[in-house]
Image: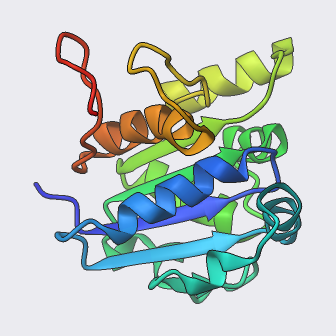
Amino acid sequence: MSIQKVVVAVTGASGSIYAKVLLDKLASQTKLTNVGVVMSDNAKDVWKYELKNELYHQYPFQFYDKQDFFAPFASGSAGYDAMIICPCSAGTLGRIANGVSTDLTTRAADVMLKERKKLILVLRETPYNLIHIRNMEKITEAGGIICPASPSFYSHPINFEELAGTVINRVLDLAGLEAGGFKWGTEPDT
């Protein structure tokens, strides 16, 4: 099955560079028919603070309000293939792990789990406390994937975007999308 419809949620965790690189790479995907994006208010504030712009408005995707429960991916019948929460705050992790659907992000995550679709949480928190670890366990047991925002260095990234790309390429691979980038056992891209 090829991935065609993806939901991206951006929470207020630090790490807007990860969201930017993800949206950049999704914009270059040719086989996607639909990318829906939901950003929390804090995500917009953190993006502006960390990246010093508000360019998320310029991506060619449909953006949905955080309380828009009429968004297509709020229902399993819309047939979305994957959801990526990037970056994912510990609060969002906890709400999803405990079945608390108070906004579009947590509702869409609940839909992905109940429909047995790919749900990938790019957790941006350190260190973890026991509550975080248990919440990660719950999501993993329910079928979700925890992919911490832990960059790799063996491809010799030369700037922040390339460093973030080491995580995002892994996320795209996990989602079943073309990621490119460095693969162990190959020469780094130059």
128 vs 10: above or below: above
Quadrant housing the N terminus: bottom left
Q: Residue at x 35, y 47 (%)?
A: 116
Q: Position of residue 74 (x, y in %)?
A: 54, 75
107 or 6, nearer to the observer? 6
Quadrant of the rendered structure where residue 77 is?
bottom left
169 vs 135: above or below: below
Q: Residue furthest left?
A: 1
Total count of labels: 0
- Residue 164 in the figure: left or right of residue 93: left
154 vs 92: above or below: above
Q: Position of residue 171 (x, y in %)?
A: 42, 39
Asked if residue 83 shows in the view, the reply is: yes
131 or 64, nearer to the observer? 64
Q: Position of residue 43 (x, y in %)?
A: 79, 63
Q: Residue at x 64, y 73 (%)?
A: 38
Q: Position of residue 60 (x, y in %)?
A: 45, 85
113 vs 147: above or below: below
Q: Residue at x 46, y 46 (%)?
A: 119
Quadrant housing the C terminus: top left
Q: Residue at x 49, y 55 (%)?
A: 22
124 or 146, nearer to the observer? 124
Quadrant of the rendered structure where residue 6 is?
bottom left
- Residue 57 in the figure: left or right of residue 147: right
Asked if residue 143 shows in the view, the reply is: no
Identify the colour scheme used. Answer: rainbow
